[in-house]
Amino acid sequence: MLYADTKALSLGTASTPAEGVELFIIYTVLGVPICFKRDDKNSIADRIEKEGGDGIIEFCIVDNNINSLEWANEATKADLLQNADPTVNATFITNRNDIHSGQIITLDSTKRDINQQFILQKVELIRVDTGGASIVYVYQVTIANKFKKLEDLFLHLLDKADVSGAGAAAAPGGGAPAGNGGATTFLGLTDTPANYTGSANKFAKVNVGENALEFAILSIENNVIKTGAFTVGRIAKINNTTGIIEMGTNTDTDVTDAVTKRHTAGADTTLGTLVADVNMGTHKLTGLSAPLASGQSVRTTATITEAGLEDAVSKKHAQNTDTILDMSALLASDHTYGGLRDYQYVGESVVFGDLLYFNWTDKEWKKTDADAAATMPGLRIALQDKSDGQLCDMLVKGYVRDDTWNFTASIIYASVTPGAMSSTAPSGAGDQVQRVGVAKSADILFFDPSIDVGEI
């Protein structure tokens, strides 16, 4: 028997073996397992807060290669760093084009009570249907994190790896190596470009041979829909209805020529001698010809000079010779008028032909009522149908026709009916009497209101 405290071996016999006698020792190796337990109190507390319960999730690692407590300690520590907290995954969209997989970003939102770091797992270019004619492309980003920072795991693994390139380091207590030596930069790998020269703003992609990486400009051709075969040099255009890229009719040479064109007199744009007719709507100038001398305009049969134009503009109208103004002659149909007009706001709904007074409080025009002095005198006639607060065309003085009128005498008065006028003067006690004009016929009035009002 082997005594562990004294390291003495007992043969179980009474006599001492003689010198030179061979001893055969038969022993059995006892398989005593190495057991090591570790927990993460912060992770347990987080789970209790978020999920309830005791927050404990147990997992047993069985590895026959582990042969020391130190190695078991490191194995449990690495497993907790990787699995102690659940992964948080999320997606969002953005129009930024300077993000890529592998970046670490910080989300700080007081509204959502979050201030964490996340790693960008995937960045995809997607098409968004806006419901209109335009097409929008945005980036959909997938992010992930754990309740503990991901860097803790990365730094732990890096600390255990031999990044010096000196060779593989043994695991604690012997056994399998804890890490492998290797390149510490992207360019140090064997299947990547040798340098970054000339590759600014480019992305790494798998080459055509599918055996290495190379730098290239990001291509989104698989996300763009086009129709038909394209001819080299033609301009591409987007169909706003379908969102499909189509080939245009012009070439890049056409566009360049249009943008840089210099018009040379007598070469690129020659109008020649102006002898053709000129049409302006339904009007037509015929037989036009170029001016014969400086100071002349484009000519028709007779020469029009600057002096002639100035004389026409500054012409003094002689009474009964140049201009005889007959406003009543224009009233050939219902709701026509001629004279001095105004354009003001109304304080209530009015219709064509209403007699209006100025309301001092509201600073707006409203319908008259000869029953009260506060709604007089009438100084405007509405020439439009308008609602409260709208601008309305009004007659200040002149002729107006409304076929709903039925005047029976020449002198016209403001009526006790709001906004109306009558051939009969008001006669009730307290009524207001105002002459507003002279009737030319049953439906035509020469509006020339008096500012004086009498009370009965």
Image (tube, helix red, strand yellow):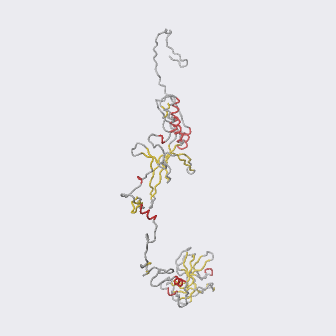
Residue furthest to the bottom: 320
Vertical order, 197 against 376 (above or below):
above
Considering depth in this image, is 300 or 360 the residue closer to the camera?
300
Whether residue 407 is visible, yes or no, is no
Residue in the picture at 46% in, 43% down: 194
Residue 382 location in percent, x, y?
Answer: 54, 80
Vertical order, 229 against 196 (above or below):
below
Q: How many marks?
A: 0
Whether residue 390 is visible, yes or no, is yes
Q: Is residue 210 left or right of residue 438?
A: left
Residue 131 location in percent, x, y?
Answer: 45, 60
Residue in the picture at 46% in, 12% down: 22
Vertical order, 138 against 55 (above or below):
below
Residue 144 location in percent, x, y?
Answer: 50, 45
Vertical order, 357 against 141 (above or below):
below
Q: Quadrant of the C terminus?
A: bottom right
Image quarter for residue 268?
bottom left
Q: Is residue 49 left or right of residue 256?
A: right
Image quarter for residue 286?
bottom left
Residue in the picture at 59% in, 76% down: 364
Residue 246 location in percent, x, y?
Answer: 39, 59
